[in-house]
Amino acid sequence: MQLSFWTYEGPPHIGAMRIATCMQGVHYVLHAPQGDTYADLLFTMIERRDVRPPVTYTTFQARDLGGDTATLFKKSVAEAYERFKPDVLLVGASCTAELIQDDPGGLALALNLPIPVVPLELPSYQRKENYGASETFYRLVRACVADYKPINKSTQPSCNILGPTALGFRHRDDVVEVKRLLEKFGVSVNVVAPAGAHPSDLARIPDAHFNIVLYPEVALTTAIWLERQFGQKFVNVTPIGVGGTRDFIKAIAEMFQIDAADFLRAETSRLVWYSRSIDSTYLTGKPVFIFGDATHAVCIARVAAEELGYQVVGLGTYSREFAREVRAAAKLYDIEALITDDYLDVEAAIKTANPALVLGTQMERHIAKRLGIPCAVISAPVHVQDFPARYSPFMGFEGANTLFDTLTHPMMMGLEEHLLGMFREDFEFHGDAGASHLGHTASPVQAEDATPLSATWDAEAERELRKIPFFVRGKARRNTEAYATQNKVTLIKLETLYDAKAYYSQ
Amino acid sequence: MNELSPLSVPVTAGCSDAPVLRERGQREVFCGLTGIVWLHRRIQDAFFLVVGSRTCAHLLQSAAGVMIFAEPRFATAIIDERDLAGLADANDELDQVVSKLIERRPEIKLLFLVGSCPSEVIKLDLSRAALRLNQRFAAENRRDLRVLSYSGSGIETTFTEGEDACLASLVPTLPAPPSTLPNLMVVGTVAEIVEDQFLRLFAALGIDNVGFLPPRRAAEMPSVGPNTKFLLVQPFLAETTAALERRGAVRIAAPFPLGVEGTTAWFTAAARAFGISAQHCANVLETPAARARDSLARHRVTLAGRKIFFFPDSQLEIPIARYLSRELGMWLSEVGTPFLHRELMAEELELLPAGTFLSEGQDVDRQLDRCRDNMPDIVVCGMGLANPLEAEGYTTKWSIELVFTPVQGFEQAADLAELFARPLRRRAMLKV
Ligand code: SF4
């Protein structure tokens, strides 16, 4: 049993719903109690979908348990088929139904429906949402390519884009951007899946030369299987950031032995120049803490370090399946990766790292807000704000433009920071007023430790401390107190403050 | 009663014996765990620990939406395969989770172990766990901390029934009254602002001995005994009613305090039960009732003559439908309720216009068909259905807001109307 206040991922059947909901012609019958229908609102409210997810829940009740929940399941399947006339049916159980062991797959197959029925066995007590999405996509693809007849492949390089789903973080716009990039580079896109695909599209996946694993959390398993089954190579380089996008194009170029140099000279992002422009100098070495799904965390860390000149002081993920990749990435920045799905651990790590910017999920946004640290959201789990009305991809060169804005706007502008440093007692421009870009109401909560004070501050030292810009004041206070404790100073004076400053800047 | 009905609604036999369509298909409603979202705000030193699955945890955080506090006073003890495979004793595991929790949150005075579908299917006995933990905390000199249990599972409870189960679990622990003086208990979660208004009106009526269940703090539990009379402020409290009756308390039958008419009747029933003269009661209620009636006029312009369709959700549907039809002149196209407790609803059904189409339970796809056939002007439904219906051209009001917004009493009558008027005004405003 695990004490959980907040979860980064839902149960695996939510992952299955993300696949069913983004496709055409697929319906999912889920053996589940009524409360599990809350899942619909993730799609209709958070993502603002204008149709209900194609999911029928059996909504069995306690009184059914003694009787025949299996009959209820079969009835639900038959009625769902009649009403929705899908081309493929997914069937499965949520956590509760898994315990009553009705065998949804067997029951549905026994109905002899004239369409493929794909049973999903998603262990709810072991795995989570991304696994559920990955497994569902894999099962569906396997079922749909079962009767594949090889064709003569086109002479032009062609690919499938695998991984985008409903409720995915910026998937909607990433697909548009990556497709545009590929087509400009001369690679045609055979199928995008699962988002927008029909089962008949999945059946055509082997027609393409290769696969692009756009989101490994969802599509890597499928891509590996397709390679084994059809010899289809795959590219598992995520085109996030300028470097990531260039590497992505180069990986494809290498596969077909084409020269991408001209293309990459012509195609670029404003990030390259914006980051070099002098206004960005102030970004140099700003400590940044990154947490998210593995793919986004690793890619954003690279952008932060190589393309914006931040210093990555924290990197972590809740995707245990990809812990290895994140650990490897953390090594590049000489830090230890944080692999956890307990947000309290993340909060503690952020406090310790004391970053100037947090790049995380909605949860880290809340944490950062509490700590008064600027923050941007770079990964699922998603929130209604992560589906902006405007075009806002994270991938490709346009995505790098988005990233430049997203990753720098929460920070204070360079000149503003200097002025704040120079005129610390200005009545409307002092640290406690908060940074102007956080709005007038933002009054940062000081991330000061609640540990009992061993030393007290005299009035003069306290006044001086208040002149220190608020974003480093917490650290200054902690350091001074630590220094005082270490040197058995009980009353912190002006001298102590500067002694400590000198000590820590050695 | 005429001065209470601002519109001249023809006096009818109401819906006391009206037929009800009973449905047993797919239900698109939350489970009782959802009640935690408002209950933990109401009882400020209580903690709700769901013993369930990742789904339960996900439901709670999705229903709570943006309400992620510094550290919420609810959490889930997520059952994992070790518990299921018997590799770990689930009871020991639960005790460990509780210890960890209490260590983190020593200020907690009341801990609810909340059962879920998985905990019930594996027959994890949470009432025994509560007993065991109470004994342990007593031995550890933490008598100020009490552990209770109830079920919020989706196989047992629908949405607001979770609150019913929670309150029912509190009833046996309520203290006996210190004296034999009659006391009044108001049962059901209300916003603090509503509680304060009610207290002022009860005092003006001459009823001083008033307790609220649930209270704001664990130490403020109301007392109950044979001299207790209680008023339900929420309609979904059947189990709590039975538990209170077992303690000898007597329910004051009344419509629910929604709208001017409902609130007037509710206070009047209380006054009658406490032997307060009808004249005094009318005098006390006159001013706030008149003010509330005036405040409705603006909304009547938007709502009168409009057709409303209720999907079943909170059990508030019937009282709200009664209010909207009698005080605001709306037409009721279908009033769905997850459960119809005829006894608790008797006074409401009497007031509902004769011929109202009532349904109990749900078969969501068939109900959607009926809704489309009816072409209502506004649909009251859960969050899963609202946007898809809007996209089809219907105006909707998501029902969870009816539970999260202070809507009871005179001063909130117009706020309740506003909840329905706003989506209609908005649709009329938008030119895109
Ligand atoms: S319906 Fe049951 S399993 Fe689902 S969230 Fe509610 S209690 Fe948990």
Image (spheres, rainbow, N blue to C red):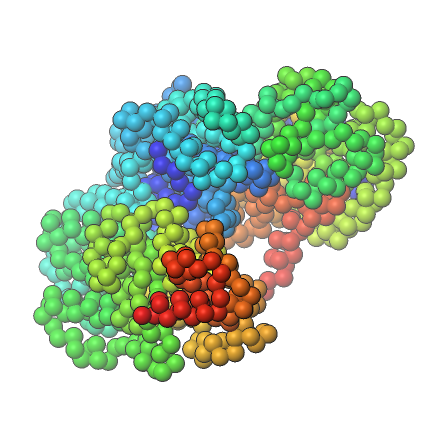
Q: Nearer the viewer, residue A258 or A362?
A: A362
Residue B98 coordinates in the image, percent (x, y)? 43, 32
Q: Quadrant of residue A5?
A: top left
Q: Nearer the viewer, residue B63 or A108?
A: B63
Horizontal side, residue B182 vs residue B219: left or right: right
The single residue placed furthest to the right in the displayed view is B279
Residue A81 coordinates in the image, percent (x, y)? 35, 37
Horizontal side, residue B310 vs residue A148: left or right: right
Q: Is residue A411 visible?
A: no
Residue A388 coordinates in the image, percent (x, y)? 44, 62
* Residue at figure coordinates x 24%, y 50% from the top left: A323
The single residue placed furthest to the bottom in the displayed view is A278
Q: Is residue B103 visible?
A: yes
* Residue at figure coordinates x 72%, y 48% from the top left: B414
Horizontal side, residue A237 vs residue A460: left or right: left
Locate the C terminus of chain B and report the quarter of the image it occupies.
Answer: bottom right
- Count of numbered circles in the view: 0
* Residue at figure coordinates x 28%, y 68% from the top left: A305
Locate the N terminus of chain B and report the quarter of the image it occupies.
Answer: top right
* Residue at figure coordinates x 45%, y 40% from the top left: B104
Residue B351, placed above or below residue B398: above
Residue A357, placed above or below residue A26: below
Q: Nearer the viewer, residue A492 or A45?
A: A492
Residue A437 coordinates in the image, percent (x, y)? 50, 70
